[in-house]
Amino acid sequence: GQVTTDMATLSREVEKFAEGKKMEIEALKMRDSYRKEFMGNISHELKTPLFTVQGYILTLLDGAMKDKTVRKKYLSRAAKGVERLIYIVNDLDMITRLETGELRLKKENFDVIEVVQNVFDLLEMKAAKKNITLIFDTDYEPVWVRADREKIQQVLTNLLVNSIKYGKHDGTTEVIIENFSKKRVVVRVTDNGEGIEKVHLPRLFERFYRVDKSGSRKEGGSGLGLAIVKHLIEAHKEKIFVESVPGLGSEFSFTLKKAKKPGGVTAETRVAQ
Ligand code: ADP
């Protein structure tokens, strides 16, 4: 009796071990194909700006350098291309750190109104180029939230950059902050731009996913903006939503946890209803 029981236990153990190994191998294979896909996407994203920069440099070497105006124009375009490369590499760095769980949140209590205003100041010029009006009702009382201020500023920047990129000339982008629940506020970023077809919405936050491949590439993003936004909001254990009507515009919104002002008053009583 003793021996058979042991054999049975042993064989069960062996089976369990083998099963575990099989799963480990599957996980490794998945990680490997994920890595290969990621690397493929990265080289694809980097190629366009690299070839652009190379093009300008080669043309300059080919004789365009002699003319002062042409030289200046091509050099500044090459510099733009390099700037774009830096943006892409920064986004890649951020997404890698988010996906490997390396990024730590530094939570503090802050007034989210101030952050919206910071981002508006940073993007004013960009919006002006398309004559887009950035709207934010500044009559709000402070809205104290508890989150990583820098990361939330990044979220707002990415959403507002998109609303300008995909917004129409002479259009508007509005930021609204409202109560979401007793403990949360919701920040809405609304544009009256081109909008997004429903079929794309479920995949919109995937990295490198784009609605219109050629169109978006012309706009020069990394395809990582929304993936970063989603990661950052989820790292906060908050929620992100998107609603869109093609031809009319889009609204991206996310929640934040209310906090007490370092002095003591809760945000709830201070947010516009
Ligand atoms: P990209 O670098 O291409 O802008 P994102 O991850 O920021 O990458 O956005 C993914 C895609 O979602 C964009 O390529 C675009 O097609 C679509 N998109 C994002 N924001 C908007 C918006 N406000 N209006 C319309 N389309 C948008």
Image (cartoon, rainbow, N blue to C red):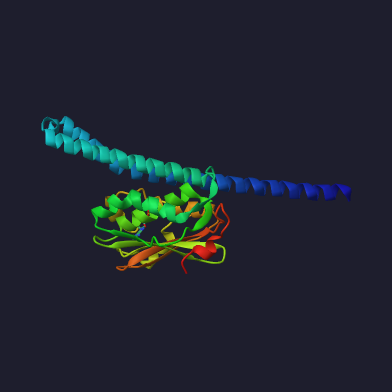
Q: Is residue 165 above or below residue 51?
A: below
How many numbered tags mark residues here? 0
In the picture, measured across the screen, residue 165 lies left or right of residue 40, that is left
Ligand 1 lies in quarter: bottom left
Q: Is residue 73 above or below residue 210?
A: above
Residue found at x 84% / y 50%: 5
Residue found at x 36% / y 55%: 160
Q: Is residue 92 above or below residue 116?
A: above
Give x and y (percent) for residue 161: 34, 53
Residue found at x 36% / y 43%: 87
Give x and y (percent) for residue 262: 56, 52
Give x and y (percent) for residue 127: 28, 54
Residue found at x 12% / y 31%: 63
In the picture, measured across the screen, residue 268 lies left or right of residue 14, that is left
Front-lying residue, 96 or 164: 164
Front-lying residue, 65 or 29: 65
Q: Is residue 43 visible?
A: no
Front-lying residue, 201 or 13: 201
Q: Is residue 93 visible?
A: yes
Q: Residue furthest front?
A: 263
Give x and y (percent) for residue 6: 83, 47
Q: Residue furthest left?
A: 67
